[in-house]
Image (spheres, grey):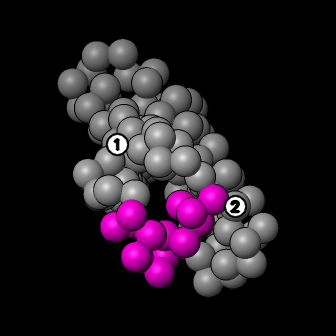
Amino acid sequence: MNVVLWIVAGLLAALYLAAGGMKLATPREKLLENPNMGWAADFPGAAVKGIGAVEVLGAIGLVLPRALDIAPVLTPLAATGLAVVQIGAIIVHARRKETKALPMNVVLLVLAAFVAIGRFAG
């Protein structure tokens, strides 16, 4: 089970590092040109950057604490935080009737919850 948790955490970390990094590095106006980022129009630029920062920090927290054996309790906490981010994303996309985004959000929520539960239990 430990290997599966590492694989899932690594995949989530790569995805959130890319997604969060994009939100942090790309100007809001440029983000709004992306058809998958329409939700950003409903939020101030600082909120979008904040979400990006949470995603990047969560990605780091999924891997580094456990890999370095320094405060490994941060790994399930990071996974829990990313699950909460996905709950927020599901709510935003549902309110905006962006149903195409929902399956991916649900998958990411389930995977983050899997890592959180697996790491809290182990």
Residue 85 in percent (x, y) is at 58, 47
Q: Can residue 107 be seen at all in this image of the molecule?
A: yes
Residue on which the image places disc 1: 56
Q: Where is residue 43 in the image (x, y as percent from the top left)?
A: 59, 52
Where residue 81 appears, as percent x and y from the top left, is: 55, 37
Residue ID at (74%, 59%): 91
**Front residue of 20 and 119:** 20
Numbered mark located on residue 92 in the image? 2
Residue at left offset 62%, top offset 83%: 100
Q: What is the span of residues highlighted in magenta in the rendered image?
A: 29-42
Q: Which residue is drawn at 42% across and 31% down?
A: 75
Q: Is residue 89 above or below residue 76?
A: below
| Along the line of sight, the residue nearer the viewer: 20 or 11 | 20
Element type at marker 2?
Answer: helix
Instruction: Provide the secondary structure element on which disc 1 rests.
Output: helix
Residue at the limit of the structure toward the front, as seen here? 29
Three-letter amino acid code at the position of disc 1: Val
Image quarter of residue 7 = bottom left
Q: Indicate left or right for 101 with 50 as reference.
A: right
- Mark 1 touches mark 2? (CB < 8 Å): no
Tell me the CA gap for discs 1 and 2: 20 Å
The type of residue carrying mark 2 is Val
- 10 Å neighbourhood of mark 1: few (<14), some, or many (≥20)? many
